[in-house]
Every structure is written in C-alpha cells, then in structure tokens.
Image (tube, rainbow, N blue to C red):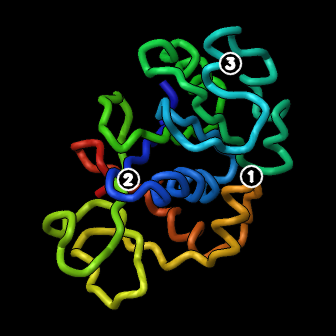
C-alpha cells in the first residue's frame, strides 16, 4: 500500500471540505486528489472516478507523467457519483501508481483504512464542540487561540481559492505551504497529531 496516502474530512464546512484536499495535495508537490464523496464538488477535469470504475483505468490514468503531473504537480479526479465499495479496486490501482494521494471524504463519515486529517473552521464560541489537539484548523477573521497540538492554517487569499477551484495549482502560497507538516505528522489513531 502507498504510504503517502491521506484522507481529508471537513464535516462542518463544505467550502473547506472542497479546498482542503487541494491545499494538502499542492503542499506535497506531485500528488493526485480523488474525491470519495458521491455528491462531491464538480472539480475541473475530463474524467471522474465513476468513469474509471465503469470503463477501467487507462495507462494514462495510472501514470502521473501521462496526465501532465510533471507540468502541474497536481491532478484532481472528481467523483461522478460512485460509492467507495464500487470504486475500491480503482482506488487501490491509483494508490499503487501515484507518488502521493489525497482522498476527499464526504461530510457524513465513511470508514477508510488510511490516515484521516480532520479539518475544522476556527470559530469563536466552540460552535462545533471543544477545541481538539491533533487536527487542522482553518483560521478565520477572529483572533482565537489555536488549541495546543493543533495546526492552524492562515486565512487564504480569495485569488488562491479561485485558482485552486478552477484547476490551477499555485506553488507559492503561504496557505499551501502551511499544509506541509501534515505529511510528516501522523498519530497512532491515524489522525493528524
């Protein structure tokens, strides 16, 4: 199994759930993002995971060089309406072929055998429960202390988010760079921390 596999889960914020895997993958460099959410975002691209499940992955799908990874550093495979059970063989083939993979999980949790990075908005008032160590927080406009042992991402610039969601993957960004430590830190419970 590929040791450079992480899954992102952002249950409270759909936008954060859509951009978190892109930021994490962009911080790694050569990486594939695969959306495991059947109702996930319509990421740019010609193919979806559902296409690979129905017709089988091609040599190009399984080759980072063929998909243009050498030029962009990042490839994204939207879901297209297929469940994890049906797509597992294709996902395993992708994991065996790519140097690093980020899996995007749906807001309603699904069980996966890979380390999960929990991503939450850092908001006042503990709206989503007590602050937790060992997860990634997205800072907002409020000056809120970061929980001990957690990673806090700076507020991303709007142009960066627009670029990521349009399929462009900027390499120079403080927000993207802030994701880097996630690849090095994994706790015994397979969460970041």
Q: Position of residue 44 (x, y in %)?
A: 73, 44
Q: Residue at x 20, y 69 (%)?
A: 127
**What is the tally of numbered marks visible in this picture?**
3
Residue that carries the numbered disc 3 in the rendered image: 51
Q: Describe the element under mark 3 as helix, strand or loop.
A: helix
Q: Position of residue 45 (x, y in %)?
A: 76, 38
Q: Position of residue 65 (x, y in %)?
A: 82, 34
Left or right of 132 in this view: 53: right
Q: Residue at x 39, y 58 (%)?
A: 13
* Nearest to N terminus: mark 2 or mark 1: 2
Of residue 100 and residue 47, the one placed in the foreground of this image is 47
Q: The C terminus is located in which quarter?
A: bottom left
Residue 4 visible, this orientation: no
**Distance between mark 3 and mark 2 Cα atoms:** 25 Å
Q: Are there few (<14), some (14-19), or many (20+) residues within 10 Å of tag 1? A: some
**Distance between mark 3 and mark 1 Cα atoms:** 19 Å
Residue that carries the numbered disc 2 in the rendered image: 10
Residue that carries the numbered disc 1 in the rendered image: 167
Of residue 45 and residue 132, the one placed in the foreground of this image is 45
Residue furthest top as drawn: 55
Residue furthest bottom as drawn: 143
Q: Look at the numbered discs 3 and 2 and tell me whether their residues touch, using CB distance below 8 Å.
A: no
Left or right of 125 in this view: 186: right
Q: Are there few (<14), some (14-19), or many (20+) residues within 10 Å of tag 3? A: some
Q: Residue at x 35, y 29 (%)?
A: 112
Left or right of 123 in this view: 28: right
Q: Which image quadrant is residue 134 in?
A: bottom left
Q: Residue at x 25, y 69 (%)?
A: 149
- Residue 160 vs 183, above or below: the answer is below
Q: Which image quadrant is residue 185 in?
A: bottom left
């Amino acid at each position: 199994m590929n040791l450079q596999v992480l899954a992102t889960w952002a249950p409270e914020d759909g936008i954060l759930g859509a951009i978190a895997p892109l930021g994490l993958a962009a911080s790694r460099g050569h990486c594939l993002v695969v959306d495991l959410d059947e109702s996930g975002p319509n990421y740019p691209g010609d193919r979806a995971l559902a296409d690979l499940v129905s017709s089988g992955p091609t040599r190009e799908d399984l080759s980072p060089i063929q998909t243009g990874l050498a030029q962009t550093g990042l490839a994204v495979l939207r879901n297209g309406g297929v469940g994890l059970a049906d797509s597992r063989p294709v996902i395993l083939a992708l994991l065996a072929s790519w140097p690093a993979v980020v899996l995007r999980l749906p807001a309603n949790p699904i069980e996966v055998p890979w380390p999960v990075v929990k991503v939450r908005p850092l908001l006042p008032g503990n709206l989503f429960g007590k602050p937790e160590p060992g997860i990634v927080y997205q800072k907002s406009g409020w000056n809120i202390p970061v929980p001990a042992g957690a990673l806090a991402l700076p507020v991303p610039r709007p142009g960066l988010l627009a670029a990521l969601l349009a399929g462009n993957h900027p390499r120079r960004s403080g927000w993207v760079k802030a994701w880097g430590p996630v690849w090095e830190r994994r706790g015994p419970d397979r969460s970041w921390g």
